[in-house]
Amino acid sequence: MVLVADASILNGCGFRMRSFGLPLFFAILAGTAVPALVFTGLVLRLGNPLEAQYIIPVGGMILGNCLRADIIGLKQFYSSLQKQEKVYLLALSQGATRTEALRPFFRDALQASLAPTVATMATIGLVSLPGMMTGVILAGADPASAIRYQIAIMIAIFSGTALTVFLALEWTVRISFNRCGTLEKAVFSRGPFKAAVRSESGG
């Protein structure tokens, strides 16, 4: 599941698999595994947190949201950087470190990637009944218990998406920038950065 999600992000963002495959894989794995294990171990209090009956559906819910958040966050980060590259380079020329110059792009990307999850959390039970809440109710459990489980899984989803996007941005930045702090556009297989490389080379 993580491998398929990794390939989907690489394809959706136009990244080279050789450059970004492993960093994104481990970012997704961490963002999915940590909240899923906390949910099955602490919330469900299972003797075996890796029991397939629980870890697969819970992990699947978290992974699906991490996939969407990663694509949104990475696209927002690199497309904004492409559009405002002169602003970034100006910050570097004025003495800012790479981290300081990238901070506004980093912040905007995190906000954009987490916005769908925050909007869903704000309207739980008002706009629609989420999957876990509906499933627990249909299984015959008390609606109050279903609400508690849904709140717990939404916290897990939010934590997972925040963690995976943060790690994906942190780890891809280390690869996509050289020692001088400028973007290595050759690591992109397609998209605006690849087009920029071709125009610069006259291809």
Image: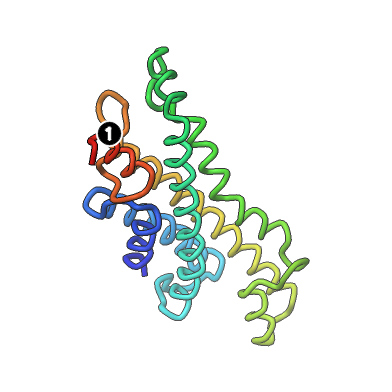
Q: Which residue is drawn at 59% across and 57% down?
A: 155
Q: How is the image coloured?
A: rainbow
In the rendered structure, which amino acid carries the disc numbered 1? Answer: Glu
Position of residue 16 measured from the top left corner of the image (x, y, whole percent): 27, 51
Residue 150 in view:
yes
Above/below status of 45 relative to 14: below
Q: Which residue is drawn at 44% across and 51% down?
A: 164
Q: Which residue is situated farthest in the right direction here? A: 126
Badge 1: how crowded within 10 Å, few (<14), some, or many (20+)?
Answer: few
Considering depth in this image, is 64 or 73 the residue closer to the camera?
73
SS label for mark 1: helix
Residue 100 in view:
no
Considering depth in this image, is 140 or 192 the residue closer to the camera?
192
Considering depth in this image, is 115 or 154 the residue closer to the camera?
115
Above/below status of 40 relative to 51: above
Position of residue 33 measured from the top left corner of the image (x, y, whole percent): 41, 61
Q: Which residue is drawn at 49% across and 34% down?
A: 105
Above/below status of 57 relative to 65: below
Q: Which residue is drawn at 70% across and 69% down?
A: 147
Label 1: which residue? Answer: 200
